[in-house]
Image: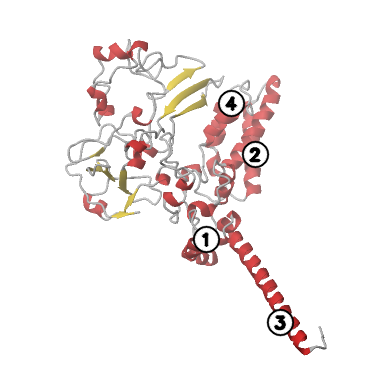
Amino acid sequence: MNIRFGRKSLMLGSVTTIVLGLAGLAVVGAAGIAGWEYSNSNAFCATMCHGVHPEEIAAHKVGMHARVNCVECHMGRNSTLHLMALKPTHAKELWGMIVGYERPITSGTLRPSREACESCHWPSVEHRDSVDVKVHYGTDAESSESRTKIVLHTGMDAIRQGYTKGIHWHIQNEVTFASPDPQRREIPWVSVKKPDGTKATYIDAGSKLTVPQIEKLEKRVMACYDCHNSVGHPFRNPANTVDDAIRAGRIDRSLPDAKARAVALVNALGEITGETKDREAKIDKLIADATAKAATPAEHKQAEQKFNKAMRDILVAASFREKGFSWKSFPNHTGHADTPGCFRCHDGKHYNDKGEAIRLQCTLCHALPEVVREKGKGTVASLLPDKAGEKQPESHQRPNFMHTHSDDVGPECEKCHGTPLKQGKQGGNFCANPACHGRTWPGMDLTAEPPKKASVEPEKKG
């Protein structure tokens, strides 16, 4: 722009330069912010930065943490400057994207719980115990229903007084452990430090590792995600997904052998891999072959079609692109149904120098399960109505109680638990609880003997 007055022309030129400079800075800043936001997005983390299993992305979208972004766990909820400092530490993943690498089945980049989990799940807040009802269906012709009600001891109302009980006891007490497995399926060594300073060390009597080998393992303080390891992208047992489908009516129980047929299809899923379209075609053929073999009567054709649609969705969601992978490749350490989980430590064979085991007692973490069966006997009340407030005998407090409780059964037990006290899984009395007996628990071994020595000094790493 030309102005005749020299001084004014200079001033206007300077203003124009400043305005253009500020506009340029604004554009660069906006682009930088957009780039930063994209670099923290799930799309960038899971595909551009490094290629995780595509099934993990799908699992995250339908999990309870679907609205929690990858970076909130893998980088934590920190200040922007802190996150900028952390970002370059993930640059090693870029080289893997260029030259290729095996898709990971575990993460080594999770931030401490206090920077991630505890941003929402504040440990010091008052919590209550929770109730869960698990619905399962049998493989008999009628797919008989059973409901298991369980009270989980998740309450933390006593944490302000300096003690806790139940599942979140591990928050108030410092637990250090060692594992030779990146997924921490095995934990041969555990050390506990209580708030009063007392310590105890436990070694797995059934471990194949020697004490010197255990000494060389990295010792780490237990974090929330050492148990709650699959909340970000959970892979459920497809048989449990079938139970959900039956309960919700997506699979009709009027179809004969509905659950048994569904389980057979789930068991045949392991050989089906490949790209999505290839898997879908193989699954369609698998279902078609099973339908032809079943020869369903005409009156059940509508239920058959409903079954086939539901099973197609379940099988596609549970299938994997790459060979050698399944839902079993990603263990869920919460609970102890499909994988050892809690029994990695509470298995009855982690002993200290005194021969005491890490406590294996069902009621530490939950009340005794109550089972109601559609066909057959369920459980009865744990205690007689007038015995609910009585103090438990000393035998119930022994660390090795689960090892010996069957040997302790006698007339004294009947005073609180009623009669008859007969072991089994058929239901109908206190000791025949089908939720506990008559099934195999992964990682459980009630026959292991205490080791001669159980002491390895920890070299803790957070």
Which circle, 3 or 1, is nearer the viewer?
A: 3
Judge the density around disc 2: few (<14), some (14-19), many (≥20) Cα neighbours within 10 Å.
Answer: few
Mark 4 residue type: Arg
Q: Is residue 145 above or below residue 101?
A: above
Badge 2 vs badge 3, beta-carbon distance below 8 Å: no
Q: Nearer the viewer, mark 3 or mark 4?
A: 3
Q: CA distance from mark 2 to mark 3?
A: 74 Å
Which numbered disc, 3 or 1, marks the residue that appears first in the sequence? 3
Residue 46 lies, with reference to residue 158, above or below; the image says below
Q: Around disc 4, counting alpha carbons within 10 Å, would you say few (fewer than 14), some (14 to 19), or many (20 or more)?
A: some
* Mark 3 or mark 4, earlier in chain: 3
**Of the image marks 4 and 1, the number of the one nearer the N terminus:** 1
User: Which residue is at 48% across, 54% downward?
Assistant: 76
Tag 4 secondary structure: helix
The residue beneath circle 1 is 80
Disc 4: which residue: 247
Q: Which residue is mark 2?
A: 285
